[in-house]
Image (spheres, rainbow, N blue to C red):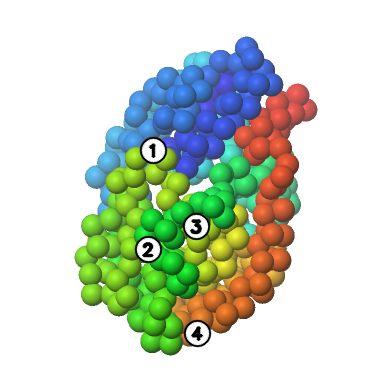
Amino acid sequence: MNIFILAGEPSGDKLGGALMAGLKTLRPNVRFEGIGGMEMAAEGLRSRFDMSELSVMGLAEILPRYRALMARINQTAQAVVQMQPDVLITIDSPDFSLRVARKVKAASSIRCVHYVAPTVWAWRPGRAEKMARSIDQVLALLPFEPPYMEAAGMRCDFVGHPVVSEPVATAEDAKAFRSRHDLGDAPLLLVLPGSRQSEVTRLGPVFQQVVARVQQSRPDVRVVIPAAAPVIGTLRRLTQNWAPQPIILNPLAVDGDPSGDKRAAFRAANVALAASGTVSLELAAAGTPMVIAYDMNWLSRQIIGRMVKVDTVTLVNLVSETRAVPEFIGANCRPGPIARAVEDVMDTPAAQRDAMALCMQRLGQGGEAPGMRAARAVLEGIAAA
């Protein structure tokens, strides 16, 4: 069996590596060609070019590299058509992946599978119909996504979210973390302002005021910020006048597993204040109660506010079909209400626990690993075609 597989960013590379491992287990004679990073290379892929060439975000960043990116799209599509694989698997990165798939479909009848469904349930539902012109099958991370894809004419398999396969810190890990950082039994507030410069600079001042308000009523509160490597410097600058002074976890300064300290912090925390995103699922997996807050520039607020179709953007709320996690988005991202919600959650954390547990169960926790489920779905799709 011959498979062309491609990913354009680290999260997709991780999904691709797990999928390739599953396919190798089910079809030991499988051969891979394509584009990926270290995780996919570990499963035997020799990437046709460095995946980092595709990790470009934002109009200002894309425009200077537009011709180079289009050349890579054309080159990749030609390689797929020339190879004539049993299936083309594209992973996330829709600006690259779906353009390749469209060109492949225009020149061949090769089966195309896309891993990670677009968020048509939240906004721009027309993307599903457009995608169906070139994609035969979608592998979905969230359990409520298949009907949206199927309505557009594509096969869609829910394969589980990768968060359910990630390691989780133990109570002993949390105790050791508190001891290492001299936290004792103090209430611990985890602050997660995002991984992009734009997020951190916009949310940092709001989160600073939240922390200050919480500290006024709870003088013994301690703050930990597990920082993403690209924003370490920005976080240090923004937090130099915070009170209390936060402990910033630098993943680049950790020997061994750089995520171990972060996982232990998640387990040790009493409550988390986090930017909107998949981090809510990481917190739920660790059993850490949370408050979600996010803001954007004025123009984005107006555009997205008119397009969004759901009343919550927090994945724990969506998957559990509850509204257990308080969220403060856009104009509602204000320090006073956020601080009150943080204190409420700190006082009554049990209110979220059932929703978090249900969310993890629905995402596939305790079942077959998502990579293996995805591999089975790909093979079943090929057999049924």
Indicate which disc, 3 or 4, sits on the residue closer to the N terminus.
3
Indicate which disc, 2 or 3, sits on the residue closer to the N terminus.
3
- Whether pointer 2 and pointer 1 mark residues with C-beta atoms closer than 8 Å, the reply is no
Indicate which disc, 2 or 1, sits on the residue closer to the N terminus.
2
Q: Secondary structure at mark 2?
A: loop
Residue carrying label 2: 182
Alpha-carbon distance for marks 4 and 1? 38 Å
Residue beneath the point at 57% across and 21% down: 3
Residue beneath the point at 30% across and 77% down: 243
Is 182 situated left or right of 341 in this image?
left
Alpha-carbon distance for marks 4 and 2? 27 Å
Alpha-carbon distance for marks 2 and 1? 22 Å
Q: Secondary structure at mark 4?
A: helix
Residue beneath the point at 35% across and 55% down: 249
Viewer-closest of 261 and 367: 261
Of discs 2 and 1, which sits in the foreground?
2
Q: Which of the numbered marks, if any, corresponds to residue 256?
A: 1
Indicate which disc, 4 or 2, sits on the residue closer to the N terminus.
2
- Give coordinates of residue 374: x percent, y percent: 66, 35
**Hey, which residue is sitting farthest right in the picture?**
384
Residue beneath the point at 58% across and 39% down: 115
Q: Amino acid at mark 3?
A: Lys
Of discs 3 and 1, which sits in the foreground?
3
Residue carrying label 3: 175
Give the crowd class for mark 1: few <14, some 14-19, many >=20 residues within 10 Å.
few
Alpha-carbon distance for marks 2 and 3? 10 Å
- Whether pointer 3 and pointer 1 mark residues with C-beta atoms closer than 8 Å, the reply is no
Q: Amino acid at mark 4?
A: Arg
- Give coordinates of residue 371: x percent, y percent: 62, 35
Q: Amino acid at mark 2?
A: Asp
